[in-house]
Image: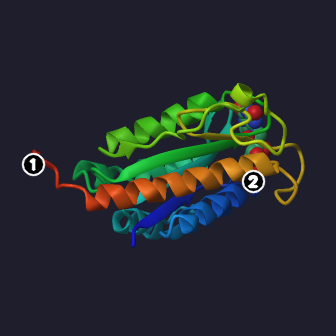
Amino acid sequence: MSKVAIVYHSAAGHTAALAQSAAEGVRDAGAEPLLLRLEGDDYAQALEGVRSADAVIFGAPTFMGDLSAGFRAFAEASAKDWYVQAWKDKLAAGFTVSNSPSGDKLNSLTSLALFAAQHGMVWVSTGLLPGTVAGKIGPEDVNRLGSFLGVMAQAENAPADVTPPAGDHKTIRLLGARVAEAARRWKAGSPAAVATAA
Ligand SMILES: Cc1cc2nc3c(=O)[nH]c(=O)nc-3n(C[C@H](O)[C@H](O)[C@H](O)COP(=O)(O)O)c2cc1C
């Protein structure tokens, strides 16, 4: 069974709620989710969790147009693993949430993809057409904000049990399942053809 780590920072709980839905999606695909919330400044458990996983879904709220400082601190703490490329060839994907429909969330997803690339990881997109294609951009609809690079969610100024809406939870659940399925296929496939220096 593949293991998918979900590493996330959340200040007010919206990212945390979305992480739970990502975990549901991982289970939908028959894989094991490992939820790792970033709190405080001890990242040993999160780093060990990433090392033990076949794939990792990174999540952070968008603060001031980029990843929250709580996530960035974890990214910087991963430098020792970066130096030996300990996460190389693991699959990676990402999600973010902010208050505005745009809120400059693309910048956060780009930061997550770049972070994964620095670690030599292989990025998995949403694989979802934008809701606009089917004329479905309501709160119940999948990929209502139309993102390919990773999942975008939008939360109102309300608690995490009422926002983001169901459509955003469905979207991140689908990403969880997609990453788990990709990890299963990736593990079952051929070993890397060319061995490179770690
Ligand atoms: C310091 C700070 C900066 C923020 N910057 C943005 C922003 O740039 N764009 C936006 O749409 N929302 C912004 N927000 C709103 C958060 O992204 C939003 O409340 C999000 O749901 C918080 O996620 P969390 O509950 O997981 O902490 C900001 C909130 C805070 C506290």
Q: CA distance from mark 2 to mark 1?
A: 41 Å
Point out which mark residue 14 bears.
2
Q: How far from the left and from the top, in percent, is residue 55?
A: 41, 57
For this view, does 75 lie left or right of residue 22? left
Query: Image quarter for residue 115?
Result: top left
For disc 2, the neighbor class at 10 Å (few under 14, some 14 to 19, many from 20) is: many
Quarter of the picture containing the N terminus is bottom left
Q: Residues within 10 Å of mark 1 (few under 14, many from 20)?
A: few
The amino acid at mark 2 is His
Mark 1, residue position? 195
> Where does the image place residue 13, in percent across and percent down from the top left?
75, 58
What kind of element bears circle 2?
helix
Q: Earlier in the sequence, mark 2 or mark 1?
A: 2
125 shown above or below 43: above
Give the SS element for disc 1: loop
Please give the name of the residue rendered at 77% of the width and 46% of the height, measured from the top-left corner: 167
Residue at the spot 61% in from the left edge and 33% down from the top edge: 129
> Can residue 102 be seen in this snapshot?
no
| Mark 2 CB within 8 Å of ligand 1 | yes
How is this picture coloured?
Answer: rainbow
Looking at the rendering, the quadrant in which ligand 1 lies is top right
